[in-house]
């Protein structure tokens, strides 16, 4: 499946992860699955890149992680938004919507 | 189960946890794929394919958390430091007297040391503010112990024959009268050879400097003005170049203006004029300072050899007028020349202030040690509760660091003010004071001083306070901490050290103060009451002939004598106490100079015959100078002082002896006709090496006017000004003042040094006495039980007192003994500053040592007496 999805814009993966976590805490595998489901495979995200982004966001203090039991009773690291991460995703989502609307309007009829 | 996210500062995952997380992800992915029907092998491949580079991801994640951890550690350290600082500041605010004492004393020490270093830095260490200053040398005639300046003949020979220097120059300073027609002013004018500005590589601000043509004999007079003079007299007039200024009545064409910031050699010079020297008839007089810029690549030794060679070559040419065969030519770094004898002075003062700083630090150390001792139980408790020794040490050091920082800030402020004061007030005593700054090396010294302060009064008490067995301290009833043997020993050593430092300081102070008193007691040799003097120089343009000059001097004297209150008027080319006119060499008929010997040199003072009656000098032998001696056809006679007669004719009369003035062997003999009492012209501290008085004719254009009045000094000076203005408003009066004023001016430097040393000496004394007092108070407090028992058992109070006083005084004695040894070495530095007292004066050393021991004994007795007076029952019940 590698190579035939849309290429990600810079910083988009971070926003996607924060977006997923805005719906509730999740572990890495769960986030990967949700990204895949909601974008119906259009976006090609490697799992490694996803984990790199998660740990980067953790360093930046946008997400928190804690070990917990997963649904099939295995240990998993659960990620959740910090207050700072919540603010960030709200701001960036609003910005993204404005941007997308502007581009969509511009490209209408093309 | 949902994880809680209350804790926002969770710890970072370990690398193992990151491995576990990534492995769990891959496992789940494989399971999901197998559930879709993938084989084990295909599932693994697909999962890894989907994941990407596992190792790179792992490393990236680990690195992210390491960065986070580092940042947090730094923040923790900083906030811990901030906490320590604020805790320390609050703790110190509870003991304001202690804190203020330490900050003030250490601050003064650091500040004063910094100012002294700034002065030394400017005068000694810093290169001269000229281009390639290492190439600059002063060239002189070396006749140890003297270094003579050059004559015109010497300079011209040097200029023509030398090749070792890329350029040489000569200059001589002269006071000249400047008049713009309305008022007259005396300027400090420098006559320079054309090469002067080239040797120093000074570019004019505007116009040009002297070209060789301007410096030829017969060239029209030209001048270069200083910026300051241009500003004050011409308001920075941009069209100054080409204008004419009248100096001594002669018109000089202005060629250019010097830059605003003059170098140390040019400071205070108002104008430069081309010297236009021509080959003279005889070798002297020796008034020219010669400078040279060593040619690149020429070794110094080669230049020195060449100077000696030129001197040998020209020696025979001038043999008739100059016979000092032993003298050679030599050279000296211009920097050392400008610094003069300042390095010695600054070394002494710097030693004094550094001592105060050291004592202040040691004193702070003692005070803090006592403070730590008082808190020893608290500190031991902290250690027992798990604080590491390093943690406790850090806490204690922080207090010292806070104190040192405050002291350093205070010291920096003092240094800033001090440097400004020196730059404005002490410019005449500190060479290159204008170059003093609080920056660079000086700032470095300030910082090093701060760091050393922390080391001395931080580390010593902290280490001493945290050492020792914890159990001992806790078991100790806590009544006193210096009970710890080590703490007591450190405290005692510090007190001894204070005395070891205070002793040489006080000895130095006393030596300098004695010097001042001896200088004040020096008598000039005559009654100075009502005698005032001033310099007068007649402009050559209007008083070119001797007739004109004689007429002026005669008329001036006549008119001054008509002023009521003025009882006598005389003229001389020198004046007491330190304005000697000439150093002259001569050859005695009775003691001809053999080859390889130098001719004797003494100060020659030319006076008009009225001079002796004016100062009230009566001849010891022979007669005084008379009017007939000043006539042109009179046979040359001189009067000498008693010191001269004793030096050259001990045990016999000097009357009737003959000598050749200036060593001129073809001149007629000069005869000694009288001997008078000693009067000082070479400074109060100079030994009496003999003065020769020669009759003053009338053709001199520059003289000191000497007036004795019976009334008010200020009124007499006013009258002198009025008479001079009436005669010629274009002639200024130079450096007027009474002899007493001149004497006190000449005492300014020793008085300043003595005051400075006394101020710091008193601080050192107080700090040391406080040190021994607090140590003994502590000691007595610890032993009050022992005292009580001794008294209760019938011990005599005097005996008990003696025991404690002896303990303290013995300690001080060790310090004082060390201090005396130090003083013997240090005071050698001060030798040049002392007068009338030896650097190893036994009375001074003994007196200071005895006084310190007595004061220390009293300081020890006071706390001991307090306990002895208390009833033993009270003391013992306290336990």
Image (cartoon, coloured by chain):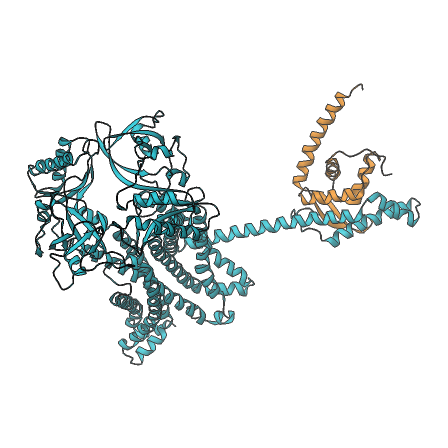
Q: Which chain is cyan?
A: B
Residue B340 in sight in this render: no
Q: Is residue B78 above or below residue B790?
A: above
Q: In the shown orientation, is residue B610 left or right of residue B214?
A: left
Q: Residue at x 38, y 65 (%)?
A: B497
Q: Which residue is more in the foreground, A1 or B496?
A: B496
Q: Which residue is more in the foreground, B53 or B371?
A: B53
Percent position of residue B241, x then y: 35, 27
Q: Which residue is more in the foreground, B479 or B762?
A: B762
The quadrant of the image that shows the C terminus of chain B is bottom left
Q: Which chain is orange?
A: A
Percent position of residue B28, x then y: 84, 48
Q: In the shown orientation, is residue B813 left or right of residue B516?
A: right
Q: Is residue B239 above or below residue B539?
A: above
Percent position of residue B272, x then y: 32, 36
Image quadrant assignment for residue B32: top right
Q: Residue at x 69, y 35 (%)?
A: A89
Percent position of residue A91, x then y: 67, 33
């Amino acid at each position: 499946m590698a190579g035939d999805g849309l290429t990600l814009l810079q910083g988009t993966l971070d926003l996607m992860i924060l977006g997923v976590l805005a719906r509730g805490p999740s572990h890495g595998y769960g986030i990967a699955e949700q990204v895949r489901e909601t974008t119906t495979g259009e976006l090609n995200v490697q799992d490694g890149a996803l984990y790199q982004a998660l740990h980067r966001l953790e360093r930046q203090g946008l997400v928190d992680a804690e070990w917990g039991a997963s649904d099939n009773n295995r240990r998993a690291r659960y990620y959740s938004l910090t207050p700072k991460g919540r603010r960030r995703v709200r701001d960036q989502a609003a910005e993204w919507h404005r941007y997308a609307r502007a581009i969509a309007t511009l490209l209408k009829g093309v | 189960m949902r994880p809680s996210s209350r804790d926002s500062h969770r710890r970072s995952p370990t690398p193992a946890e990151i491995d576990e997380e990534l492995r769990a992800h891959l496992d789940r992915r494989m399971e999901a794929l197998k559930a879709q029907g993938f084989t084990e092998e295909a599932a693994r491949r697909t999962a890894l394919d989907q994941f990407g580079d596992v190792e790179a991801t792992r490393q990236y994640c680990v690195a992210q958390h390491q960065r986070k951890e580092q940042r947090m550690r730094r923040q923790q350290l900083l906030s811990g430091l901030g906490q320590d600082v604020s805790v320390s500041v609050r703790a110190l605010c509870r003991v304001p007297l202690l804190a203020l004492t330490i900050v003030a004393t250490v601050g003064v020490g650091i500040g004063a040391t910094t100012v002294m270093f700034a002065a030394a830095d400017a005068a000694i260490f810093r290169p001269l503010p000229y281009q390639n200053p290492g190439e600059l040398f002063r060239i002189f005639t070396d006749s140890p112990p003297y270094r003579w300046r050059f004559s015109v003949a010497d300079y011209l020979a040097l200029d023509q024959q030398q090749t070792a220097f890329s350029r040489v120059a000569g200059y001589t300073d002269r006071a000249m009268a400047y008049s713009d027609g309305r008022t007259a002013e005396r300027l400090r004018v420098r006559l320079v050879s054309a090469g002067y500005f080239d040797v120093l590589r000074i570019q004019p601000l505007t116009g040009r400097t002297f070209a060789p043509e301007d410096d030829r004999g017969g060239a029209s007079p030209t001048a270069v003005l200083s910026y300051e003079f241009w500003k004050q007299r011409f308001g920075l007039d941009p069209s100054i170049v080409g204008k004419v200024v009248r100096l001594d009545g002669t018109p000089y064409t202005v060629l250019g203006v010097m830059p605003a910031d003059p170098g140390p050699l040019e400071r205070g010079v108002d104008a430069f004029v081309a010297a236009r020297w021509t080959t003279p008839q005889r070798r002297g007089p020796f008034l020219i300072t010669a400078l040279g810029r060593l040619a690149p690549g020429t070794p110094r030794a080669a230049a020195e050899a060449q100077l000696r060679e030129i001197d040998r070559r020209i020696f025979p040419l001038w043999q008739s007028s100059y016979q000092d065969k032993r003298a050679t030519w030599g050279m000296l770094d211009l920097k050392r020349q400008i610094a003069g004898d300042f390095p010695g002075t600054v070394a002494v003062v710097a030693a004094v202030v550094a001592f105060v700083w050291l004592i202040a630090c040691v004193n702070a150390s003692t005070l803090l040690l006592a403070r730590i001792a008082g808190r020893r139980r608290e500190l031991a408790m902290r250690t027992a509760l798990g604080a590491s020794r390093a943690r406790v040490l850090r806490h204690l050091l922080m207090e010292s660091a806070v104190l040192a920082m405050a002291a350093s800030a205070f010291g920096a402020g003092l240094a800033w003010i001090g440097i400004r004061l020196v730059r404005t007030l002490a410019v005449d005593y500190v060479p290159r004071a204008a170059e003093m700054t609080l920056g660079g090396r000086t700032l470095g010294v300030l910082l090093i001083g701060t760091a050393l302060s922390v080391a001395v009064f931080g580390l010593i008490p902290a280490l001493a306070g945290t050492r020792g067995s914890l159990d001992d301290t806790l078991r100790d009833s806590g009544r006193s901490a210096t009970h710890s043997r080590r703490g007591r020993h450190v405290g005692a050593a510090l007190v001894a050290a204070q005395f070891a430092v205070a002793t040489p300081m006080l000895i130095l102070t006393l030596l300098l103060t004695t010097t001042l008193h001896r200088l004040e007691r020096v008598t000039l040799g005559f009654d100075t009451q009502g005698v005032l003097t001033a310099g007068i120089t007649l402009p050559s343009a209007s008083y070119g002939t001797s007739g004109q000059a004689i007429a002026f001097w005669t008329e001036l004297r006549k008119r001054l004598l008509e002023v009521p209150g003025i009882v006598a008027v005389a003229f001389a080319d020198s004046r007491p106490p330190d304005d000697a006119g000439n150093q002259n060499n001569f050859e005695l008929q009775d003691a001809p100079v053999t080859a390889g010997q130098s001719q004797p040199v003494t100060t020659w003072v030319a006076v008009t015959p009225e001079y002796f009656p004016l100062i009230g000098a009566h001849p010891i032998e022979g007669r005084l100078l008379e009017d007939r001696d000043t006539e042109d056809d009179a046979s040359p006679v001189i009067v000498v002082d008693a010191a001269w007669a004793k030096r050259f004719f001990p045990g016999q009369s000097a009357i009737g002896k003959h000598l050749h003035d200036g060593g001129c062997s073809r001149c007629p003999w000069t005869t000694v006709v009288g001997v008078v009492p000693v009067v000082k012209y070479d400074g109060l501290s100079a030994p009496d090496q003999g003065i020769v008085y020669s009759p003053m004719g009338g053709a001199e254009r520059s003289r000191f006017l000497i007036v004795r009045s019976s009334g008010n000094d200020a009124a007499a000076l006013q009258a002198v000004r009025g008479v001079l203005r009436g005669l010629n408003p274009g002639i200024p009066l130079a450096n007027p003042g009474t002899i007493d004023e001149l004497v006190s001016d000449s005492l300014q430097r020793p008085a300043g040094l003595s005051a400075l040393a006394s101020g710091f000496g008193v601080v050192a004394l107080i700090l040391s006495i406080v040190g021994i007092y607090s140590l003994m108070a502590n000691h007595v407090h610890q032993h009050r039980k022992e005292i009580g028992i001794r008294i209760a058992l019938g011990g005599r109070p005097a005996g008990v007192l003696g025991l404690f006083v002896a303990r303290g005084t013995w300690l001080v004695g060790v310090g004082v003994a060390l201090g005396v040894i130090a003083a013997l070495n240090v005071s050698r530095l001060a030798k040049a500053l002392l007068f009338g007292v030896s650097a190893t004066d036994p009375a001074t050393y003994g007196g200071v040592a005895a006084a310190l021991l007595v004061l220390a004994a009293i300081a020890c007795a006071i706390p001991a007496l307090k306990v002895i007076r208390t009833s033993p029952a009270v003391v013992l019940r306290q336990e």
